[in-house]
Image (cartoon, rainbow, N blue to C red):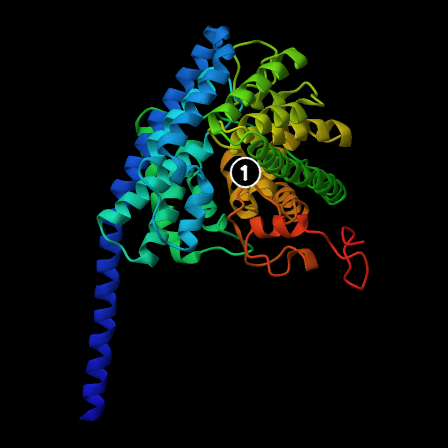
C-alpha cells in the first residue's frame, strides 16, 4: 500500500512539474513575443531613418560642416537628460550581471536620435549600439511592467539584446548567441538560450515584415576537391596568420577608442565642447586624407570608386582603408558621438582581410569575409557568435576557415575589448596582470598600474 501511494505521488509530482513548465513557457512567450516584435519594429524604423539620413548626406555634402554643431547638440541632450544612460551597452551588461536600477526607457529615444544625427552630419559610427540599447531599454521597461524578479530581469535583458542584434543585422542565430556570450569571457549564459533565440527570431522576422532588407555579401571562392589534403592545410595556415592580424586590429581599435576617449574627457570635461572638437577633427581628417569615403557606415556609397564593405569582396586590392576607417571611427566615437562600433569593425575587418589576402596570396573575397567577422570577434570577445554570423552571412561552405579566424583573433586580442563591463569568467591565458580582475575595465586598470622592477617589489616610479 505504501509503495502504491509513493508511486502515485511520483506520478502527480511528474505531471505537476510538466504543468508548471508549460505555464512558464506560455508566460514567457506572452512576454517575449510582443517585446521582440516592438524591438524589431523600432529597429526597422531606425534602419530606414539611417538610410534616409545617409542619402541626404550624399545629396547635401555641406552638411558635414555642421558636424561639430550636431555633435554638441547630441552631447548637450545627453548631458541634460541622459547622464544615467551614457554608458550605453556597458550599462546593459552591468544590469544583467547585477540587476539594480534597471535601464531607463529614455535610453531608446536618445540613442535613436543621437545615432541618426551622427550619420546625418557625417560621423563615422555604426548601428549595433543603437539596436542593442533599443532592445535593452525596452526589455527593462517590460520587466518593470511585469514586476519580474532579478533572474527574470536578466533573462529579459539578454532577450532584448538578442532581438536588437538579430534584427539590425539580419542574423538571428548570431544575435541569440551574442546576447549570451558578450556578458563574460569564456562563458555562455545558457539560462537565457531559448528566450534569446525566440526574441532574436521574432525581432528579425518583424524587421523583415516592415520591408527592411539587409545588404547581401557573397564569397565566390570554393576550395577545389582535388588535392584538398595539400591545399587546405596551407590555406588554413594562411587563415591563422590573418587571424592574428585580425585580433591585433580588434585590440588596436578597442584600446585606441578607450585611450583617446579617456584623454579627451580629462582635457575637455564638458561633453558638448568635447563633441564639437571631435566634429572639427573629423572634418580636418577629411581634408587631410582628401576623401569622405570613411564617413558613415561604409556599407555603400553614392560616389563611384569609394571603398565600401561590399567592394572589398570583389577587389581591387586596398592596403590602407582599414587603418583610415579605424582612425575616423575612433575620433568620432571617443569624442561623444553615438552609434556603435560593429559596422565600422566590419569595414575595418573586410578591408584588412582584402589586404591580407593580397599579402598572403589568398582569395580576396574569402579573406574579406573572414576579416568581416573575425575583427569583431577579437574586439567584442564573442568568437562563437561571430562564427555563427559568418555561417549565416556567407554559408556553411566556409565554416572551418571562419571558425579558425574568429578563434585565433579572440585569443590574440587579449584581455581587451570594446565592452569594458564584460566579466572575465575564464581568462584567455594565465598572467599576473589579470589575476583578480573581475571585468575588462579592471584588467585595463591593472595594466596601467606601475609594475615591480624586480623581485624586491620596488616599482620604477619608486626608484
Q: Which residue is mark 1?
A: 390
At 57% from the left and 24% from the top, the residue drawn is 309
At 60% from the left and 23% from the top, the residue drawn is 328
Taking 106 as reference, is 245 left or right? Answer: right
Does residue 123 appear anywhere in the picture?
yes
Q: Nearer the viewer, residue 241 or 3?
A: 241
Residue 147 point in image, percent of width and height = 23, 53
Taking 132 as reference, is 42 left or right? Answer: left
Residue 234 point in image, percent of width and height = 76, 41
Taking 303 as reference, is 157 left or right? Answer: left
Residue 336 point in image, percent of width and height = 50, 29
At 35% from the left and 32% from the top, the residue drawn is 81
Q: Secondary structure at mark 1?
A: helix
Res 223 quadrant in image: top right
Does residue 221 appear anywhere in the picture?
no
Q: Nearer the viewer, residue 158 or 271?
A: 271
Q: Nearer the viewer, residue 312 or 391?
A: 312
Amino acid at each position: 500500500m505504501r509503495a502504491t501511494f509513493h508511486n502515485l505521488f511520483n506520478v502527480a509530482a511528474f505531471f505537476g512539474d510538466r504543468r508548471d513548465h508549460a505555464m512558464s513557457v506560455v508566460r514567457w512567450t506572452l512576454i517575449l513575443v510582443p517585446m521582440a516584435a516592438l524591438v524589431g519594429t523600432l529597429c526597422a524604423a531606425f534602419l530606414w531613418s539611417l538610410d534616409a539620413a545617409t542619402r541626404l548626406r550624399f545629396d547635401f555634402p555641406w552638411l558635414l560642416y555642421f558636424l561639430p554643431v550636431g555633435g554638441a547638440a547630441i552631447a548637450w541632450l545627453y548631458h541634460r537628460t541622459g547622464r544615467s544612460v551614457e554608458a550605453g551597452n556597458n550599462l546593459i551588461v552591468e544590469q544583467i550581471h547585477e540587476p539594480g536600477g534597471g535601464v531607463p526607457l529614455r535610453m531608446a529615444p536618445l540613442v535613436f536620435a543621437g545615432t541618426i544625427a551622427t550619420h546625418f552630419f557625417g560621423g563615422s559610427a555604426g548601428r549595433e549600439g543603437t539596436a542593442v540599447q533599443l532592445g535593452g531599454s525596452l526589455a527593462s521597461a517590460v520587466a518593470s511592467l511585469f514586476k519580474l524578479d532579478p533572474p527574470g530581469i536578466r533573462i529579459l535583458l539578454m532577450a532584448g539584446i538578442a532581438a536588437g542584434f538579430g534584427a539590425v543585422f539580419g542574423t538571428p542565430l548570431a544575435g541569440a548567441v551574442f546576447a549570451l556570450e558578450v556578458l563574460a569571457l569564456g562563458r555562455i549564459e545558457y539560462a537565457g538560450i531559448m528566450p534569446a533565440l525566440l526574441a532574436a527570431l521574432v525581432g528579425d522576422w518583424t524587421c523583415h515584415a516592415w520591408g527592411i532588407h539587409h545588404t547581401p555579401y557573397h564569397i565566390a571562392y570554393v576550395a577545389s576537391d582535388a588535392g584538398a589534403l595539400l591545399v587546405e592545410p596551407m590555406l588554413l595556415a594562411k587563415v591563422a596568420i590573418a587571424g592574428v592580424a585580425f585580433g591585433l586590429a580588434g585590440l588596436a581599435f578597442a584600446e585606441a577608442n578607450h585611450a583617446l576617449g579617456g584623454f579627451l574627457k580629462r582635457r575637455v570635461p564638458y561633453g558638448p565642447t568635447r563633441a564639437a572638437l571631435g566634429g572639427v577633427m573629423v572634418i580636418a581628417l577629411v581634408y587631410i586624407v582628401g576623401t569622405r569615403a570613411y564617413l558613415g557606415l561604409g556599407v555603400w556609397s553614392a560616389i563611384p570608386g569609394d571603398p565600401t564593405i561590399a567592394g572589398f569582396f570583389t577587389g581591387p586590392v586596398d592596403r590602407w582603408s582599414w587603418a583610415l576607417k579605424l582612425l575616423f571611427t575612433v575620433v568620432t566615437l571617443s569624442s561623444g558621438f553615438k552609434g556603435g562600433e560593429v559596422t565600422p569593425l566590419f569595414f575595418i575587418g573586410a578591408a584588412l582581410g582584402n589586404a591580407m589576402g593580397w599579402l598572403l596570396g589568398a582569395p580576396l573575397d574569402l579573406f574579406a569575409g573572414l576579416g568581416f567577422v573575425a575583427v569583431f570577434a577579437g574586439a567584442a570577445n564573442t568568437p562563437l557568435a561571430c562564427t555563427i554570423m559568418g555561417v549565416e552571412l556567407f554559408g556553411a561552405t566556409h565554416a572551418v576557415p571562419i571558425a579558425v579566424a574568429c578563434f585565433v583573433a579572440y585569443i590574440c586580442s587579449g584581455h581587451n575589448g570594446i565592452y569594458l563591463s564584460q566579466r572575465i569568467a575564464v581568462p584567455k591565458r594565465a598572467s599576473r596582470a589579470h589575476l583578480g580582475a573581475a571585468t575588462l575595465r579592471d584588467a585595463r586598470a591593472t595594466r596601467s598600474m606601475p609594475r615591480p622592477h624586480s623581485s624586491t617589489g620596488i616599482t620604477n616610479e619608486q626608484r
